Amino acid sequence: MSDSLTWRTLDLVTIDGAIAPVSLPDTALNNRLDTLREVALTLLREVESLRVSQQPVTSRKVRLYDEVQRFEIELIRSALLRTGGNQSRAAELLGVKLTTLNTKVKRYKILPVGYCPDVTSNFNAEIHDQGTAA
């Protein structure tokens, strides 16, 4: 098996039936990779939700409000991920008003797409430490 990645070209069939290979432009390749990444993340989320839903119901109480809230948070996160964090497009995708989506993002404290709290808190701590050391 080869260690290098090889990108398959698309085959274009001409009018006379001949097959002509066509290479993907960088933007098309990037779009396909982004789509593949979204699908993989969605699949991972679904697997995780199956794992959570397989826990025995007898060990914990199921509260409708909590389950609805968890479902709503996952829907909003998914829409924001699909739209690259654009709340206007996410609201349109979900079929709600922008103000409703924005209120729910604030209420549920949903972090922006790509935000990693561990990295930010570590970065802020390092800056604080550098400031006190000087």
Image (tube, rainbow, N blue to C red):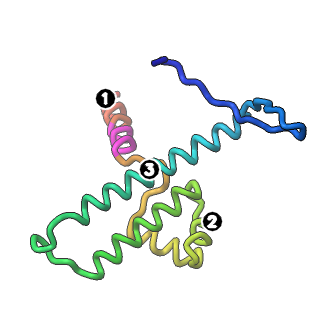
Q: Which residues are magenta?
A: 118-125
User: Most extreme residue toward the left, as rendered?
Assistant: 59
Question: Which residue, given by chain and number where applicable, does mark 3 sit on?
Answer: 41
User: Local crowd at mark 1 within 10 Å, few (<14), some, or many (≥20)?
Assistant: few
Predominant secondary structure, magenta span: helix
Circle 3 — which element? helix
The mark lying in front, picked from 1 and 2, is 2
User: Local crowd at mark 2 within 10 Å, few (<14), some, or many (≥20)?
Assistant: some
Q: Earlier in the sequence, mark 1 or mark 2?
A: 2
Q: Is residue 113 above or below residue 22?
A: below
Identity, as a three-letter code, of the amino acid under mark 2: Arg
User: Local crowd at mark 3 within 10 Å, few (<14), some, or many (≥20)?
Assistant: some
Circle 1 — which element? helix
Identity, as a three-letter code, of the amino acid under mark 1: Ala
Residue 84 in the figure: left or right of residue 22: left
Of 66 and 87, the residue lying toward us? 66
Of 109 and 92, the residue lying toward us? 92
Q: Position of residue 1 (x, y in %)?
A: 45, 18
Determine the CA span between mark 1 and mark 2. 45 Å
Identity, as a three-letter code, of the amino acid under mark 3: Leu
Tell me the tag on residue 133: 1
Tell me the tag on residue 71: none
Residue shown at 30% from the left, 81% from the top: 65
Q: Position of residue 127 (x, y in %)?
A: 38, 36
Q: Is residue 71 above or below residue 35?
A: below
Residue 36 in the figure: left or right of residue 16: left
Of 107 and 133, the residue lying toward us? 107
Question: Which residue, given by chain and number where applicable, does mark 2 sit on?
Answer: 89
User: Most extreme residue toward the front, as rendered?
Assistant: 17
Which of the 4 image quarters holds residue 25? top right
Residue shown at 28% from the left, 82% from the top: 64
